[in-house]
Amino acid sequence: MNQLMDPMDTQHREFPTHIKDAAAALRAARASRQPIAPISATYGVRGLDEAYAVAGLNTQLRLLEGRRVVGRKIGLTARAVQKQLGVDQPDFGMLFDDMELLNGSSVPMSRLIQPKVEAEIAFVVGRDLGQLAPSWSEFLHSIGYGLAAIEIVDSAIIDWKITLEDTVADNASSALYVLADQPVALGAVSLAGVGMQLSLNGEIASVGSGAACLDHPLRAAYWLACTMARRGAPLRAGEVILSGALGPMVPVKAGDRVDVQVGGLGTIFCRMA
């Protein structure tokens, strides 16, 4: 089922009532900053097709409001988390233009409910990918460069008590992201071997490596490129790929400072305001 349709399709496509109700509940939770019970149970959202339908409906409505998709995020790249949720592949969410922040930015807590942060490697697509799933070499040729990144994840579900359907429907629990200043050429760093250290207010809070992200961050990004092509929404030049967490995510609150160092990709920080 292809859930990534032209946003105008909301005028012509009739979504099942429980899909529309679940999408509306997530929008209301985000707007009010009040978490809700799992939509998988409340509205009977079952399976990936229905979860992506909820996310797709909210994506189309955001586009109609004037927001732009500027990339994708990949979730569930840790093997342990996949096992916990009973899946054997990652999931994905959309990155919108108003989600992006730059190194050193203040992160607006007024847009968040129960945020956590995680360190990642971001890739920027340098060339359009076609409608067919790319070969590995075609994919590598399409990537422009890498950047250190911080993703601010946030769930609309009370206490993060989520199922696979809940996180997928909630745009893969993505809220905001911060990009480093300095782009790095793809072949300049051994990405699977890079070490990561995330500090919260000067204290080490999370450590990891490139291998924690689906064994290699580029393998995660390649999964995304193939998945998007099969869904009729191939990656385009200039889009950002958040490839997945390099270590455990860390809860944050107003006033916290987050510093991240990612091997040869350098450092990045933000403040929760």
Image (cartoon, rainbow, N blue to C red):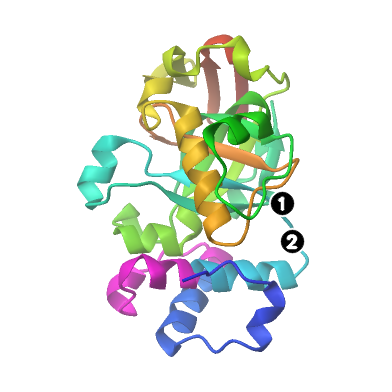
- CA–CA distance in space, label 2 to label 1: 7 Å
Q: Amino acid at mark 1?
A: Asp
The residue that appears at 22% across and 52% down in the rendered structure is 86
Determine which of the numbered discs, if any, sits on residue 84 in the image.
Answer: none
- Placement of the C terminus among the 4 image quadrants: top right
SS assignment for the magenta stretch, majority: helix
Residue 43: in magenta span: yes
Q: At which x and y percent is residue 38?
A: 32, 67
**Callout 1 crowding tier (Cα within 10 Å): few <14, some 14–19, many ≥20:** few
Residue 161: in magenta span: no
Residue closer to the observer: 142 or 158: 142
Answer yes or no: do the residues labelled 2 and 1 have beta carbons within 8 Å? yes
Q: At which x and y percent is residue 224?
A: 51, 45
The residue that appears at 61% across and 23% down in the rendered structure is 269
Residue closer to the observer: 263 or 254: 263
State the residue position of label 2. 67
State the residue position of label 1. 98
Q: At which x and y percent is residue 113?
A: 49, 54
Horizontal side of 83 relative to 247 (left or right) equals: left
Which quadrant would residue 141 be assigned to in this image? Answer: top right
Q: At which x and y percent is residue 13?
A: 59, 86
The residue that appears at 62% across and 21% down in the rendered structure is 268
Q: Magenta region: which residues? A: 30-54
Is 59 placed above or below 266 here? below
Is residue 32 in sight in this rendering? yes
Q: Amino acid at mark 2?
A: Arg
Residue closer to the observer: 150 or 244: 244
Is 268 placed above or below 166 here? above
The residue that appears at 53% across and 58% down in the rendered structure is 230
